[in-house]
Image: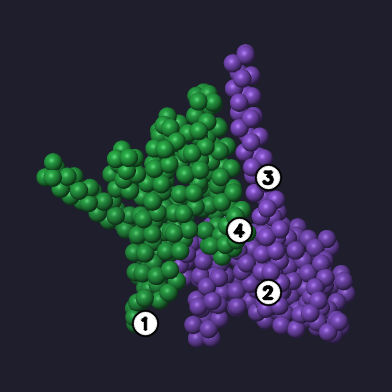
Chain colours: A green, B purple
Amino acid sequence: MNKLWKTFKQGIIYENPLLMLMIGLCSALAVTSSVSNGIGMGLAMTFVLLFSEVVISVFRKAIPSSVRIPIFIIIIAAFTTMVDLVMKAYFPDLSASMGVFIPLIVVNCIIMGRVEAFSSKQPLLPVIFDSLGMGLGYTWVMVGIAAFREVLGNGTFAGLPVMPAAYQPILFFILPPGGFLVFGLFISFNIWLKDRMQKSMKERA
Amino acid sequence: MKGIVRLGVVLAIFAAAACASLAVVYSITKPRIEAQEQIALTASLKDVFLEAEEFEDVTESLKSDNLDIAFTNAILVKGGGAPIGVAVKASGPSYGGKAVLLVGLALNRSIAGVRILELNDTPGLGANAKNPGYYVNKAEKTTFPGQFEGKYVTDGFVVKGDVAAITASTITSVALTKIVKTVVDKAALWLESATLSPTPQEGAAAGGN
C-alpha cells in the first residue's frame, strides 16, 4: 500500500509531468488562459490517461514490442475520441471552448510517455495509481496556471469577475509570453516545494 | 514472414476492438450531438430573424464555390407565410482551426445578423469575437459579429476599413469576415436565382454587384 501511495505521489510533485518531466507542454500553455478550460482539459486528460494505461497494462503481454507504438496510439486515440463525443453530447459549451485540444490529447507526450515507461511494464494496481497521480499532477498545474493567467489577464475566475471594476486586465498574461512566464514561475515553485519536502523527510529520518 | 503476419494480425485485432468500442459510443452519442446542434441552430436562427416561424432547407441549391469555406446548412426563413431571408451555416478556417458561423441575409440584401456558433481561437484574443461583452466599437457597443448587421452585400468588407478588427487578432477578424463575405455573395446570387426580392427596385440595386 505504501508503495502504491508513493507511486501516486510521484506524479503530483516529484515527477510532475508538466513541471518536472516537462512533457505535454503545448496544450498546457495553450488552454490555460481560462480556469474552466484548465479543469476540463485536466479531467479529459486524466480520463484518457487512466483508461489507456489500464487497457495497456492488462494486455501488456499480448502486445508485441515491435508494434507497440501503433497499438498504443490506437488505444489512446479510441479513448480520446470517446471523450470528445461524450463532451459534445453532454457538455456542448465545454466542448466548444476546448475545441481542437481534446482531439490533440492523442499525441500528448504525457500519455505516450507514461504508457511506454510505466504501464507497458507494470501490473494493473500500480498503473491505476500512477495514472491518477499523473492526471492529478497535470490537473493541479493546469488549474493553477489558468487561475493566475485568467485573474490577472482577464480579471475573472472561471468566468466570474473577481477584480474591482477599476482593474485594467493585463492582456500580457493571456498571451503566449505570459503563459511562459507563469509556467516558469510554477516550475521554480515546484522545485522549491520538492527541496523543502525532501529536506523535511531527511530531518525526520 | 510468419512473424510479420503475426504482428499484422495482432495489430488488426487491436484496431478492430477499438473500432467496435468507438462505434458503440458513437451510436449512443450521435442522436444527442445532432439534437444539441439542431437546438443551437434553431436558437440562432430565431435570434437572427426575429419574426422567423418556418424553416425550409435549401442546402442542396445553395452551395459554396470556395474550397476553404463550406456551407453545411442553408435555410430559407419564412415568417407569416412569406420568405423573409436566407440563412447559411458556414464553416471556414480561422486562427485556431475551424470556425462555424451562421449568417442571415434579408431579402433587401442587407445582413440580418451574424452569429458565431463555433470558434476555437485564443481565449482573450480571437475568442473575443464570440464574447458578448467585447465591443469593437465601444461608443456604439457593437460586438464583432454585431457590426455586420445592416451591412449591404455591395459593401467592401475590408478589415480595418469598413469592418472593425478585434484588438491583436487580425487573423481571426480577417478569417471571419471572409466567411461572412463568401456567404452573403453566394446567398445574394441565390436569392436572385430564386427571384426573391422585396421590391423590384431594391433587388435591381443589389443585382448590380
Q: Secondary structure at mark 2?
A: helix
Q: Is residue B147 left or right of residue A69?
A: right
Q: CA distance from mark 1 to mark 4?
A: 35 Å
The circle drawn on residue A165 is 1
Name the amino acid, label 1: Ala
- As displayed, is residue A178 above or below residue B190? above
User: Are discs 3 and 4 both within one chain?
Assistant: no
Where does label 3 land, which residue?
B23
- Quarter-of-image position of residue B97: bottom right
Q: Name the quadrant of the N terminus of chain A.
A: top left
Residue occupying image coordinates x 80% and y 73%:
B55
| Residue B14 relative to residue B185: left or right | left
Q: Which mark is residue B89?
A: none
Q: For the residues marked 2 and 3, what is the alpha-carbon distance in whole angstroms?
A: 30 Å
Quadrant of the rendered structure where residue B13 is?
top right
User: Marks 1 and 4: which is nearer the front?
Assistant: 4
Which is in the foreground here, disc 2 or disc 3? 3
Q: Residue at x 54, y 26 (%)?
A: A62
Q: Is residue A164 visible?
A: yes
Nearer the N terminus, badge 1 or badge 4?
Answer: 4
Residue that lies at the very extreme toward the top in this rendered image: B1
- Label 4 near label 3: C-beta < 8 Å? no
Secondary structure type for disc 1: loop
**Mark 4 to mark 2: distance in Å?**
18 Å
